[in-house]
Image (cartoon, helix red, strand yellow):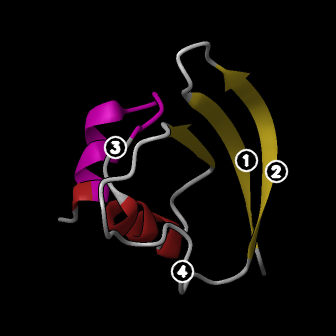
Amino acid sequence: MSSAALAREAAGERDVQIGGGAEAVQQYLRAGLVDELQLHIAPLLLGGGVRLLDGLAPATLERTRLVDSPLGVTHVSYRVHRAR
């Protein structure tokens, strides 16, 4: 059983939340399992990394929330509309 199936089973009627880096997010986006995406952006460069939306099928991200913190962190929520 996949981790997504296990999470859905454990959650029952509740929402399932995933956390992780770009590769984890890409895996769930590719599987069509993401309805909402929340990004927490901090002005800190750690070197190389994986581009979050590289190589994914076209989708529309509708921004639903934006919070700019006085500490320099920006929190952005998007609703994911998958291309058909």
Q: Eyeballing the image, is 34 above or below 29?
A: above
Magenta segment includes 73: no
The label shown at residue 54 is 4
Identify the secondary structure beneath mark 1. strand
Q: Which residue is mark 2?
A: 62
Q: Which residue is mark 1?
A: 79
At label 2, counting other C-alpha atoms closer than 10 Å, the crowd grade (few under 14, some 14-19, many 20 or more) is few
Q: CA distance from mark 1 to mark 2?
A: 5 Å
Q: Which residue is mark 3?
A: 19
Q: CA distance from mark 4 to mark 3?
A: 18 Å
Q: CA distance from mark 2 to mark 4?
A: 18 Å
For badge 3, the amino acid type reads Gly
Callout 2 touching callout 4 (CB < 8 Å): no
Q: CA distance from mark 3 to mark 2?
A: 20 Å
Callout 1 touching callout 2 (CB < 8 Å): yes
Callout 1 touching callout 3 (CB < 8 Å): no
Q: CA distance from mark 1 to mark 3?
A: 16 Å
Of the numbered discs 4 and 3, the one sitting upstream in the chain is 3
Residue under the point 56% across and 40% down: 38
Q: Quadrant where the C terminus lies?
A: bottom right
At label 3, counting other C-alpha atoms closer than 10 Å, the crowd grade (few under 14, some 14-19, many 20 or more) is few
Q: CA distance from mark 4 to mark 1?
A: 18 Å
Residue under the point 67% across and 37% down: 77
Q: Eyeballing the image, is 27 above or below 21?
A: below
For badge 4, the amino acid type reads Asp
Identify the secondary structure beneath mark 2. strand
Magenta segment includes 7: yes
Left of 11 or right of it: where is 10?
Answer: left
Q: What span is in magenta?
A: 4-17
